[in-house]
């Protein structure tokens, strides 16, 4: 005879384990406020003669305040880029900010599991909530989340830190300069 109490415990543990998986193919339904955030700014990144992506920033009241969330960033790619290249470039940008190497390695592993290869006109967007949880979307489909301490601040600094690699783009995004 099966012990009902034991079976219940096994079921609860199984459900808990399944709920901790962060990558999913199900459409996101948890972020209705993302569409309500007004535009702060937009820009484009081109390297030499190659268009890389168009980018927009949305935040409450259409105003960006450093270190304050929620916010939404959307990148519309203008060329084909592999997931491996995206992660590699992200790590390269993080190294500019002298972040803890072990954090960078851990985050890069997480991104490598989430991000797909992109083609021209594909969209990767991410939403950071007030608790600094980061939710990723690919062509408007939820692809996963990262809830590790420090990740959200480090990730957005690539585009929003005034000492970042593309100061003109940053100023356009945060609304200090019109594109």
Image (cartoon, rainbow, N blue to C red):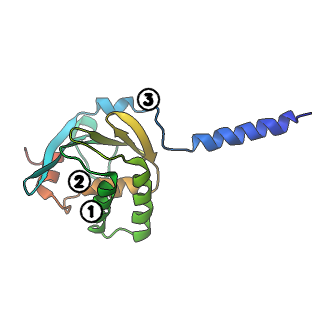
Which residue is identified by label 2? 159
Residue 22 image point, x, y percent: 50, 44
Which residue is located at x 20 percent, y 61 percent?
Answer: 164
Mark with earlier residue (2, 3): 3
Quarter-wise, where is residue 8 in the image? top right
Instruction: Kindly state the secondary structure of the residue where label 2 is placed.
Output: helix
Instruction: Kindly state the secondary structure of the residue where label 1 is placed.
Output: helix
| Few, some or many residues within 10 Å of mark 1 (<14, 14–19, 20+) | some
Residue 125 image point, x, y percent: 31, 41
Which residue is located at x 19 percent, y 63 percent?
Answer: 163
Quarter of the image that includes the N terminus: top right
Q: Is residue 129 left or right of residue 174?
A: right
Q: Is residue 55 left or right of residue 168?
A: right
- Disc 2/disc 1 C-alpha distance (Å): 10 Å
Residue 153 image point, x, y percent: 35, 55
Residue 162 image point, x, y percent: 19, 59
* Label annotation for residue 93: 1
């Amino acid at each position: 005879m099966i012990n009902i109490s034991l079976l219940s415990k096994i079921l609860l543990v199984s459900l808990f384990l399944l709920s901790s998986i962060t990558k999913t193919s199900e459409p996101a339904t948890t972020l209705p406020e993302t569409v309500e955030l007004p535009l702060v700014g937009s820009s484009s990144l081109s390297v030499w003669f190659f268009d890389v992506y168009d980018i927009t920033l949305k935040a409450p009241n259409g105003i960006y305040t450093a270190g304050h969330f929620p916010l939404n960033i959307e990148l519309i790619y203008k060329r084909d880029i592999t997931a491996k290249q995206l992660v590699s470039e992200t790590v390269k940008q993080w190294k500019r900010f002298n972040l803890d190497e072990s954090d960078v390695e851990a985050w890069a592993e997480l991104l490598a599991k989430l991000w797909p290869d992109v083609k021209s006109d594909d969209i990767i967007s991410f939403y950071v909530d007030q608790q600094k949880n980061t939710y990723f979307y690919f062509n408007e489909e939820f692809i996963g989340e990262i809830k590790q301490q420090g990740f959200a601040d480090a990730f957005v600094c690539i585009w929003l830190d005034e000492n970042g690699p593309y100061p003109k783009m940053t100023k356009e995004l945060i609304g200090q300069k019109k594109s």
